[in-house]
Structure formats: structure tokens, C-alpha cells
Image (cartoon, rainbow, N blue to C red):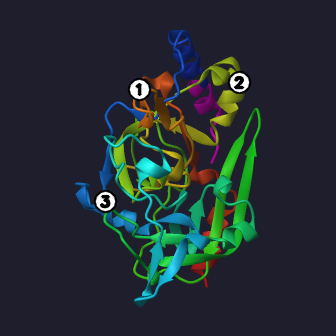
Amino acid sequence: MGYSKSQFLSLSFALLLSITANASAQHIPKVIYGEDDRYEVEDYPDRVFKDHSKSVAGMVKGYKLAEDPEDPKLLRFGKIQAQRSRALCKDEKYSDQYTLPICSGFLVDDDILITAAHCIADVTDCKRKKWVFDYVKGTEKLQKKNVYGCKEILLREEHESKYKVKDYAVIRLDRKVEDREPLKLRKLGFPKLGTDLVVIGHPSGLPMKISDGASVKWGMNEEERINVLGTLFKRRYYFKANLDTFSGNSGSPVFNMKTEKVEGLLIQGAEDYEWDEDNKCMRVSKKSNKAFEVEEMVFRITKIKGLKKLLKKESKK
């Protein structure tokens, strides 16, 4: 469902007012907005989103997994801490945790998963990857039953122009996923400014994190402010939010905290880290919660062309 004429005009007016008030805002590429609101799954206070995390998976390069010689039900993986794989400073949060996934995705049917298109180039690329559930803090080996392959790409669009942006892939896994519920999705409309959000995924390839403390914001960089009309048209496809997300969050489900439904998937964001010259290591970038400094982009779930029809067809099988 797109914007109505009256909604479009109202949003346009609000955006132009914001531009006038913030024309002098300077963009500094940073990624943690305000406080770091990332939680370990086990520590998150809301049971609902802890349950939703069971339906979120991390995408891993298949060659990085190997059967455990001591137990054929388990898979081993190379244990590389973030302080090495990301050159993080040792005193940075989560620097001692192992990094593994390179993208995130989420279940929308028994064997159907959504992620960002830029995570998967084509079906050949997709079949080289594995989807891992329950990669959480403390994981030393993976349960083989929680690792899935890609059977086919059902829907995929990756395109960005002056007036539109699309970045999604809907894939079928190699078998049905047991004991995990498909996530509920928004079916019509779009979230309002200020809507509280929650995101679940694998920031920088870390064990799964749940992050809140964010909301829908205008957020415009210099290029978007120059091309106001193009930005307004593009906003039909995505919204911006001050989510504490990183590269491995691409494809992560972004939830409406109140309705608990998926509003969209994370597709783009600001630079994750900045170099600490004194200590010769990387530090998580910091950013204020000012609306015009927000860079995290969420592709609206209602803009995945053919998804509703696909899921309806699957439900009849």
C-alpha cells in the first residue's frame, strides 16, 4: 500500500519543515545512537522478543562449517574473536565474542526466509551459504539440526535510483524449520514517525543481539536534502530509524514494539567503526539521536512485491 495523496502532501510538508530547521546539520558517519541498546538474547527483559529471536537466523559461508569428529550431530566453526576479525579494541563491548554470520534473515513460513538482496547475488551464491539458528552468546559448536541450506530464490529485487530503492530476497530453505514460528508481518500501511522499534540479528557477525531504544525518524543526509523530491518518492519504500545496527544486521527483522509485527528489514546504515589512532584499533562509532543524523534504512515489508500472494499460496498447500 503506497501513500495516499493527502498522506504524501502531509509528509512532504513535515519533511520540508525539518529541512529548514536542520539545514546546517553536519553528517558524521557513526552508528551507535545515544546509548548502546544491544542486549544478549538471554538478558532481554521482554519474553515476546526473546521468543521471536528463535525465528531469526544468521547467514554463514558454508565452507566455514565442518562436521565435528566427536559428534556427527554437531558442526564446528573457526573461533575468531571480534577483536581480531574486526580489529576491535579489547575494551570494546563484545570484543571477545566469536564472529561468524555475515547477514541476518527471518522466517515468514515453514521453509521461507527473508533477507536483504545484497546478501545473496543469485541462486548459486545462495547455495554456498548456510542459515544458522540459535547462534547466541556462549555457542561453541552448532547443532546440525539448526543449520539449513538454500533451495531456491523465490523473490529478489536489488535496485536503487533517484526515486526508488529495493533490496530484498525471499528464499526457500532446503527443508521445513521445526519448532520455530514464522514471524507476523505488517500487511498494510506504514509506521508513523516516533513508532518504537526493536531489531534482532547479528551485528558485525556477533552472536545474536536484540536492540531497542529506537524509533522511526526522518533522518536525511546531505545528498537526500539536496534531492528533496527524489527523497520523498524513495521514502515510499523505506523509513529511517536510530537503530544500533551493524553490517551483519543486513536482513534483520525490524519490529514494531507495540504490535510485535515486522515493519521491515534492515538494508543500509552508517559506517560501523572508526579508527583509534592512539591504540591502533577500531572503536564502535557514536552518534546522537538527532533526527538528521540517523542513517539506518529499513525496507518496508509491505513493499516486497509478490510476498502476500506467495505466502497465501503457500498456506493453501
SS at circle 1: loop
Q: Is residue 236 above or below residue 203?
A: above
State whether residue 200 appears in this view: yes
Upstream in sequence: badge 3 or badge 2: 3
The local crowd at label 2, few if under 14, some if 14 to 19, many if 20 or more residues have their Cα within 10 Å, is few
Amino acid beneath label 3: Val
Task: Please state if 136 lies on the left or on the right of 236 as rendered.
Answer: left
Can you identify the residue that label 3 sits on?
A: 41
Task: Look at the picture and state if 273 lies above or below 125.
Answer: above
Q: Quadrant of residue 8?
A: top right
Few, some or many C-alpha atoms within 10 Å of disc 3 (few <14, some 14-19, many ≥20)? many
- Magenta segment's dominant SS is helix
Residue type for callout 1: Asp
Q: Amino acid at mark 2?
A: Leu
Task: Provide the residue designation for mark 1.
Answer: 278
* Residue 26 position within the rendered picture, expressed as x and y whole percent measured from the top left: 53, 15
Q: Residue at x 44, y 71 (%)?
A: 133
Q: Earlier in the sequence, mark 3 or mark 1?
A: 3
Q: Nearer the viewer, mark 3 or mark 2?
A: 3
> Which span is picked out in magenta?
1-11
Q: Residue at x 46, y 79 (%)?
A: 75
**Is 4 inside the magenta-drawn segment?**
yes
Query: What residue is pinned by disc 2?
Result: 229
Give the Cα separation between the discs numbered 3 and 2: 40 Å
Do the CB atoms of the residues marked 3 and 1 lie less than 8 Å apart?
no
Q: Nearer the viewer, mark 3 or mark 1?
A: 1
Residues 3 and 237: in front is 237
**Magenta span contains residue 200:** no
